[in-house]
Image (cartoon, rainbow, N blue to C red):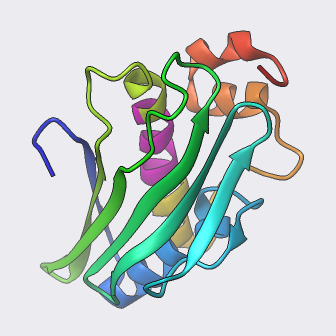
Amino acid sequence: MSTADFTVTITVDATPEQAFAAIADVRGWWSETIVGSTGTVGDSYRFEVPDVHRCTMTTTESVPGERLVWHVTDSYLSFVADTAEWEDTDVVFDLAERDGRTEIRFTHAGLHPAGECYEVCANAWGGYLTNSLYNLITTGAGDPFRRESTIETEAAKHGNIELLGLGGGA
């Protein structure tokens, strides 16, 4: 990982084990349409917003309550020139107990400010982590991409104006 990688940290009133379980529940905070499994080494799942973004992630590290790493393959981003910009990157969650709370440090290793996707992707990750995942952990209800969502509703939810020009599919 590099200091240029996109990183966000949140702190929640939960144990590291509770936070880890919520992170592994990607349908509860990222997308209801996820297909596959997420929490055990070797698990693989697919995220997709039809005609806009898809990726397959494989769990490469899983230490409950401490660390979860997903390696990205088969990535497609319709809204940037390098449609495979996410391929061969890693999505990393590091958890640590701090004064009775859990600190979650999220890093998308390979998502750099120089990349064309950075602004849009950092905005989306930030929203899903600081709102949806945070709420899933603290209230039991996240706000993932829903089956009936469109790119417009998701972009508006996250204030991602750049994506609003895409319409229902790019």
Left/right of residue 153 with respect to residue 168 in the rendered view: left
Q: Quarter-wise, where is residue 139 in the image?
A: bottom right
Quarter of the picture holding the C terminus:
top right
Instruction: Give the magenta range.
Output: 122-131
Asked if the stretch drawn in magenta spans residue 127, the answer is yes
105 versus 50 height, above or below: below
* Residue 80: percent from left, percent from top: 53, 19
118 versus 147 height, above or below: above
| Residue lying at the far right of the rendered structure | 148
* Residue 149: percent from left, percent from top: 82, 41
162 versus 2 height, above or below: above
Q: Is residue 25 visible?
A: no
* Residue nearer the viewer, 122 or 35: 35
Left/right of residue 12 with respect to residue 94 in the rendered view: right
Query: Could you tell me which residue is drawn at 37 percent across and 76 percent down?
Result: 60
107 versus 51 height, above or below: below
How many discs mark residues in the rendered view? 0
* Residue nearer the viewer, 53 or 128: 53
Query: Could you tell me which residue is drawn at 75 percent across and 61 percent down?
Result: 32
Query: Could you tell me which residue is drawn at 73 percent across and 15 percent down?
Result: 166
Query: Mostly what secondary structure, the magenta segment?
Result: helix
* Residue 71: percent from left, percent from top: 41, 62
Query: Could you tell me which residue is drawn at 34 percent across and 56 percent down?
Result: 90
Q: Quarter-wise, where is residue 169 in the image?
A: top right
* Residue 49: percent from left, percent from top: 74, 41
* Residue nearer the viewer, 91 or 135: 91
Left/right of residue 144 with respect to residue 101 in the rendered view: right
Q: Is residue 118 visible?
A: yes
| Residue lying at the far top of the rendered structure | 165
